[in-house]
């Protein structure tokens, strides 16, 4: 990802290994979101907004605007219910996550 023309041109690029294993795009698992409003103001890149979801238990959910997300990971730290996943892990529960696979590979298990 190039920082050229970005809103934060001084931001250093992510390490290539990280970008390869975790393409930097956060995603909200909407069913997990409790609409606490904590993450939108916290994202430096204005990549998170709250959206109405009439059928959702809390009537709203946070969503990530993909074009704005830099993969900084701050939202993962902020969320009290672990509602964020990296996009490759969106099928969580259908198999080992990329993170788990990488850890297993690194450990040689
Ligand atoms: S990973 Fe960073 S840029 Fe992307 S939504 Fe989360 S806080 Fe915003
Ligand atoms: S911090 Fe988590 S629970 Fe709170 S609004 Fe954001 S995604 Fe939803």
Image: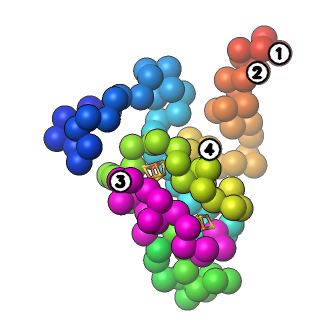
Query: Which residue bears the numbered disc 2?
Result: 104
Query: Which residue bears the numbered disc 3?
Result: 45
Discs 2, 1 touching: Cβ within 8 Å? yes
Q: Relative to the observer, which residue lies in front, 20 or 47?
A: 47
Q: In this view, does 52 lie to the left or right of 96?
A: left
Distance (Cα) linking label 4 and label 3: 22 Å
Q: In what element is the residue under mark 1? A: loop
Q: What span is colored magenta in the figure?
A: 33-49
Front position among marks 3 and 2: 3
Distance (Cα) linking label 1 and label 4: 20 Å
Query: Which residue bears the numbered disc 4?
Result: 89
Discs 1, 4 touching: Cβ within 8 Å? no
In the picture shown, does residue 8 fall above or below 68? above
Discs 4, 3 touching: Cβ within 8 Å? no
Residue 93 place in picture, x, y as percent: 75, 49
Q: Residue at x 26, y 43 (%)?
A: 8
Dot 3 beta carbon under 8 Å from ligand 1: yes
Q: Relative to the observer, which residue lies in front, 102 or 82?
A: 82
Discs 3, 1 touching: Cβ within 8 Å? no
Return the mark for residue 109. 1
Q: In what element is the residue under mark 3? A: loop
The tag earlier along the polypeptide, 4 or 3, is 3
Residue 96 place in picture, x, y as percent: 74, 36
The answer to whether residue 11 of the structure is visible from this angle is yes
Q: Going by the picture, which residue comes out furthest to the top?
A: 108
Distance (Cα) linking label 3 and label 2: 32 Å
């Amino acid at each position: 990802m190039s920082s050229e023309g970005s809103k934060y041109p001084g931001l250093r690029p992510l390490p290539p290994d990280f970008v390869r294993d975790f393409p930097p795009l956060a995603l909200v698992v909407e069913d997990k979101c409790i609409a606490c409003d904590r993450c939108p103001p916290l994202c430096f890149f204005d990549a998170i907004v709250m959206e109405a979801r009439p059928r959702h238990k809390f009537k709203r959910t946070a969503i990530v605007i993909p074009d704005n997300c830099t993969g900084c990971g701050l939202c993962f730290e902020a969320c009290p219910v672990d509602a964020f996943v990296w996009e490759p892990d969106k099928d969580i529960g259908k198999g080992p996550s990329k993170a788990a696979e990488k850890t297993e590979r690194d450990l040689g298990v």
